[in-house]
Each structure stands twice: as structure tokens, then as C-alpha cells.
Amino acid sequence: MSEAGNIGVHYAVDYERHDTGPGHPESVQRYQVLRAALEALPPAIVRLPAGRRATVAEILLAHEHRYHDLVYRDTESLADFLRTGDTAICEHSYDVALEACGAFLAAIDAVMAGVVAAAFCAVRPPGHHATASRGMGFCIFNHVAVGARYLQARHGLQRIAIIDWDVHHGNGTEEIFIADPDVLYVSLHEEHIYPYTGAASTRGRGPGLGANLNIPLPRHSTGALALAAWDAQVAPALAAFKPEFVLISAGFDARIDDPIGGLCWDDATFSAMTRHCVRLARQCGHGRVVSVLEGGYNPQGLASAAVAHVLALGQP
Ligand SMILES: [Zn+2]
């Protein structure tokens, strides 16, 4: 384990095999612009190679068996959408989703092994809207949820924090961990938009009560409001929880000029939140942070914010 070691970044042409069709915001073109920006990062940023496909057993850490099989069958039958919801698919989508999830798990392994101190995984399709039984919102498998369960099952950790700053509420992640006291889910998101969940009053259920923190933010608000909410609510919750690993659902659709999101964050907002996460992880004695791409639909804005995020991982 290294506390101030190298930063890893993962991206791969393979993710461009997931074809969502013409005019779709979660497009191959969006990823190509991001990939070009990541390729131009300073050489000190370590490129993590394509890892491996997630196994079915790993997918089942967070998903029901019948949902896994549904994704396989819908892909094999050349359906245009998952039958569970608004997720466009093509013949390669099942494979690409397994590769994306496997790469995320490989990045977690790399951090646990001390190969890198922290890492960002630029994969697609995204994951945080996928519930245990249902793909929706462009998502197939919930990478961050599988990753949290993998850290517990494979690496023997207990307390995992998931920070989700995508402009949309991560309903899938929340649902999977709603009754779990060992996974703290924190979401900062725009209120009153898709998927219309994420009320501040949803704080967990049963033994998980208190381990779910939703921070809905008003349309057109800037990063200053989000960072104030971080200081007032997120920082104390994280400090009290003392996570053994910090996972980030890193969407960049809260950035100003995103065609879907209505918030007005700038790159400095993403940098500041990233630094908060790294500092918190270091204060917990380990420094372990791995982020995974969710949304972000203005290609240039996505690329700019993601680069700011990666650089901030190494400059807390
Ligand atoms: Zn989003």
C-alpha cells in the first residue's frame, strides 16, 4: 500500500463497441473525445491496461441471476434495448459491460496491491442506475456496487463509502445498499430530474438507517453550493463512517453546458471534490480511492472535467 504513489487511469478502444445508435447522448463519439484527452495526460499517470472480464459470479455480487441472464439473452437476440428499461444495446453490449466491470475490479486490485495509490476508470456503459434486477438509464451492470461487494468478499474489507456526484441520483446503487450499514452511499445530484429518486429524506432502511445520504441540488446552482453541502453534510458523515475504501461514481454531467444536466459546476468543483475524497481516504490511514465514469454528455466538457479529476487524484 502506498499513500502518495502513482495515479492510475484506465481507458480502452474496446468500450467503443457498445453502440447506442444515432443521436444517443451516451455515444461512442463522446468516449472518443474523452479517450483522446486521457491519452494526452502526463506520463507520470500510469495507464492501467484492460484487465479482464468480470465473471458471472462477480456480477452476481450485486445483481440477480435472472437479470444477468436477461442481459445475455437480450444481447444475443439483437434487441435494440434492454427489456427492463431505457438502455440501448447492441450485439456487443453484454461483453463490453463485463469488460467494463472487470476493468474496474482490476483497478481496485491494483490499489489494494499498492501498484497505484488511486485510479480512474473511463468505461462504458455506465452503471449507477442499474438495480439488482433492472437495467435502466443507459446502465447495464452497476460497476460501483459490484466493486463495493468485491472489496468485502475478495479483499475482506467491511466499510465502503460510495460517493456519487453524477448529476442524476444513483437509484440503483441506493437500492442495492439501502439496508446495508457497511456501505455508505452519498449522492449529490440535481433535484426533480431523472430518475426522480434521491430525496434528502431517504436515509436508509432497517440496519442501514443513516448510511444513505442524498443531497438534492436546485437546477442552475453552481459548484459553490455543492461544495458548501459537502463541508456541512458529506465531510462529517464520511469522517464518522471511517471508510476502508472510497469508490466514486464519477459522472461529469453536472458540469456547466451539459446537454442533459442542469447544474453549473466547473472543473474546479470536480477537482475540489476529488481532493476531498483523497484527503478523507488518507485521514482514514490508507488513501484508497477508485473512481468509475458514469455520465457526462458534452464531449469537450466531459474530457476537461475528467482530466481535472484525474490530476486532482494525485494532488490532494
Ligand atoms: Zn447522469
Image (cartoon, rainbow, N blue to C red):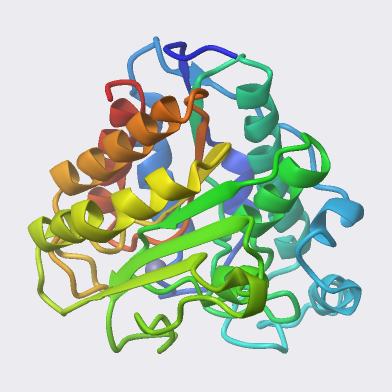
Which residue sits at x=52%, y=24%? 286
Q: Is residue 166 above or below residue 132?
A: above
In the image shown, does 50 or 218 lie closer to the viewer?
218
Q: Is residue 46 left or right of residue 274?
A: right
Q: Is residue 2 above or below residue 214?
A: above
Q: Quadrant of residue 195?
A: bottom left
Which residue sits at x=27%, y=44%? 273
Which residue sits at x=66%, y=50%? 148
Which residue sits at x=82%, y=45%? 153
Q: Is residue 79 above or below residue 287?
A: below
Q: Is residue 10 above or below residue 81?
A: above
Across and down, in percent, residue 76 comes to: 86, 72
In the image shown, does 294 or 189 lie closer to the viewer?
189
Q: Quadrant of residue 298?
A: bottom left
Q: Is residue 86 left or right of residue 261?
A: right
Across and down, in percent, residue 121 comes to: 53, 40
Please state the total of marks drawn on the protein image: 0
Quarter of the figure that contains the C terminus: top left
Across and down, in percent, residue 11 comes to: 53, 36
Q: Is residue 13 left or right of residue 215?
A: right
Which image quarter has ligand 1?
bottom left
In the image shown, does 213 or 247 lie closer to the viewer?
213
Quarter of the figure that contains the N terminus: top right
Q: Quadrant of residue 133?
A: bottom right
Q: Can see residue 191? A: yes
Q: Can see residue 89? A: no
